[in-house]
């Protein structure tokens, strides 16, 4: 029985999809104006794990993740510059060029992290028509008003606005939660269609019934998710930073337009990746990407393993020391598994313990401990087949045979050791073996000659 912590209800609930064994899931995707950093990717490993758990439980998942390539302003308070336009100016390229470049960079990193590809990956700029139509529905129902810089959603018209974040609207004062925008009726009102500046031309702007402009960040997700998942669906995921503004506003405009309550049944939010207690973010600098980790000797799957060691609703403090420990644990795990013989059986006892862990609000730390318990249990049968099922969730390539490239210096030492062995200079041969060991490799003598193996430090 799968149980999930639903942000909307603030409690664990038994998962029951709208349609039996068919699940619609939407993930707020990246704004493709820069590289996604490791903090971002913690938020994308979460829906990947969840999707794998759903498949494990026999559900068919229709997963949609968008790419935001217009409309995300530098402030979530509907002020500032479009991040895409700012990124284009930074690099001396067109907005379309940087959107394509960083979209491809994100996808490359996602593949390296073994993140399963969503069923649909719509781009906001390909769905301008749908966003305009959705705003027209809201306008017809009386939820919008026009001021100098755009078309806004009137949050006071919706009695339960802010329920996801438990906002106390009456206590909110202008400027307390968001920056003041001249003409806004209420501090929580948000822009649906910002108008283009009159004194300059944007690279991305479109005609609309209200004037030349572009879609607001929030309307994009409502339009794309409803197109591909329907006017009501099962799951919406994202980082916890999206709760108070972006996801709150998605709910407001979607329930106002479609009349479906709840618009989404289950909301899953992942906690931040932190560094020395502070959220890892682009705005604070210290951008660390997957490729940067690779350059200093870490595998993307080392980072994926690290993410599994903390519950998704708890902050994960990042350090290179912690990542090194994760790398060592993963390598040790693979080394042990590589020595296990396949008896073609499945261990139902351990598989049930694992299933109980993942179905208890995706308790990955507990699930990892079950795996270690299994491989250390000398009496356990069916290890390989059970590990195969476990890794369908973890996505760590635990059974993948790694091709070891022996460094040239090690090869030369091996050749020298064989010469000394043939001369029966056993003491010298042992010295060379120790020298090889100090370099991180272990020599095992077999009938077919010496076998080299990398030592996990």
Image: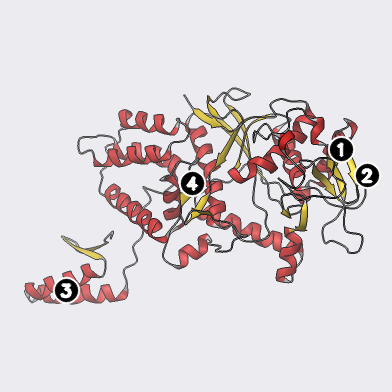
Q: Is residue 167 above or below residue 316?
A: above
Q: Position of residue 321 (x, y in %)?
A: 38, 60
Mark carried by residue 209? 2
Residue at image coords 88%, 35%: 139
User: Residue 238: which quarter of the image?
Assistant: top right
- Image marks 3 and 4: residues in contact by CB distance under 8 Å: no
Distance of label 3 from label 4 (alpha carbons): 46 Å
User: Residue 153: which quarter of the image?
Assistant: top right
User: Residue 23: which quarter of the image?
Assistant: top right
Q: Label 4 belongs to which residue?
A: 315
Mark 4 or mark 1: whose residue is earlier in sequence:
1
Residue at image coords 28%, 39%: 373
- Front disc: 1 or 2: 1
Q: Label 1 belongs to which residue?
A: 144
Mark 1 or mark 2: whose residue is earlier in sequence:
1
Q: Which of 379 and 31 is in front in this view?
A: 31
- Front disc: 4 or 2: 4
Q: Position of residue 34 (x, y in %)?
A: 64, 61
Q: Would you say 376 lies left or right of 231 here?
A: left
Q: Position of residue 317 (x, y in %)?
A: 45, 52
Mark 4 or mark 2: whose residue is earlier in sequence:
2
Q: Where is residue 186 in the image (x, y as percent from the top left)?
A: 81, 40
Mark 3 or mark 4: whose residue is earlier in sequence:
4
Distance of label 2 from label 3 (alpha carbons): 79 Å
Mark 3 or mark 1: whose residue is earlier in sequence:
1
Q: What element carries label 3?
A: helix
Q: Label 3 belongs to which residue?
A: 432
Q: Is mark 2 on a helix, strand or loop?
A: loop
- Front disc: 3 or 1: 1
Q: Which of 274 and 347 is in front in this view?
A: 274
């Amino acid at each position: 029985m799968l149980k999930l912590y639903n942000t909307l209800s603030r409690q664990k609930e038994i998962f029951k999809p709208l349609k039996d064994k068919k699940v619609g899931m939407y993930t707020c995707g990246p704004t493709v104006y820069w590289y996604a950093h490791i903090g971002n990717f913690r938020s994308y490993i979460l829906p990947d794990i969840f999707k794998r758990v759903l498949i494990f439980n026999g559900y068919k998942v229709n997963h949609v993740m968008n790419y935001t390539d217009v409309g995300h302003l530098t402030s979530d308070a509907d002020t500032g510059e479009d991040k895409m336009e700012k990124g284009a100016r930074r690099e001396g390229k067109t907005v379309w060029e940087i959107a394509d470049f960083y979209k491809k960079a994100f996808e490359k990193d996602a593949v390296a992290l073994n993140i399963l590809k969503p069923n649909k990956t719509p781009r906001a700029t390909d769905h301008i028509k749908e966003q305009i139509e959705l705003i027209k529905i809201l306008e017809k129902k009386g939820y919008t008003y026009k001021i100098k810089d755009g078309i806004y959603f009137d949050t006071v018209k919706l009695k339960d606005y802010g329920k996801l974040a438990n906002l106390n609207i009456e206590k909110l004062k202008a400027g307390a939660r968001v920056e003041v925008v001249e003409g806004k009726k209420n501090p929580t009102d948000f822009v649906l269609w910002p108008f283009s500046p009159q004194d300059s031309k944007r690279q991305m702007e479109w005609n609309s019934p209200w004037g030349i402009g572009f879609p607001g960040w929030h309307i994009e997700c409502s339009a794309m998710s409803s197109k591909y998942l329907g006017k009501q669906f099962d799951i919406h995921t994202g980082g916890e930073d999206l709760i108070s503004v972006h996801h709150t506003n998605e709910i407001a405009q979607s329930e106002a337009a479609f009349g479906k309550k709840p618009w989404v049944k289950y909301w899953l939010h992942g906690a931040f990746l932190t560094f020395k207690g502070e959220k890892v973010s682009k705005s604070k600098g210290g951008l660390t990407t997957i490729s940067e980790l690779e350059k200093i000797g870490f595998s993307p799957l080392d980072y994926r393993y690290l993410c599994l060691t903390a519950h998704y609703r708890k902050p994960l403090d990042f350090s290179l020391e912690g990542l090194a420990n994760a790398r060592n644990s993963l390598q040790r795990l693979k080394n042990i598994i590589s020595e296990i013989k396949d008896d073609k059986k499945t261990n139902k006892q351990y598989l049930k313990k694992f299933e109980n862990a993942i179905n208890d609000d995706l308790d990955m730390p507990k699930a990892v401990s079950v795996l270690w318990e299994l491989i250390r249990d000398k009496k356990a049968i069916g290890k390989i087949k059970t590990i195969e099922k476990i890794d369908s969730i973890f996505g760590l390539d635990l059974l993948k045979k790694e091709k070891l490239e022996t460094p040239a210096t090690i090869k030369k030492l091996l050749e020298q050791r064989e010469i000394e062995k043939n001369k029966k200079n056993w003491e010298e041969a042992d010295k060379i073996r120790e020298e090889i060991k100090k370099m991180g490799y272990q020599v095992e003598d077999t009938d077919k000659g010496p076998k080299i193996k990398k030592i996990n430090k």
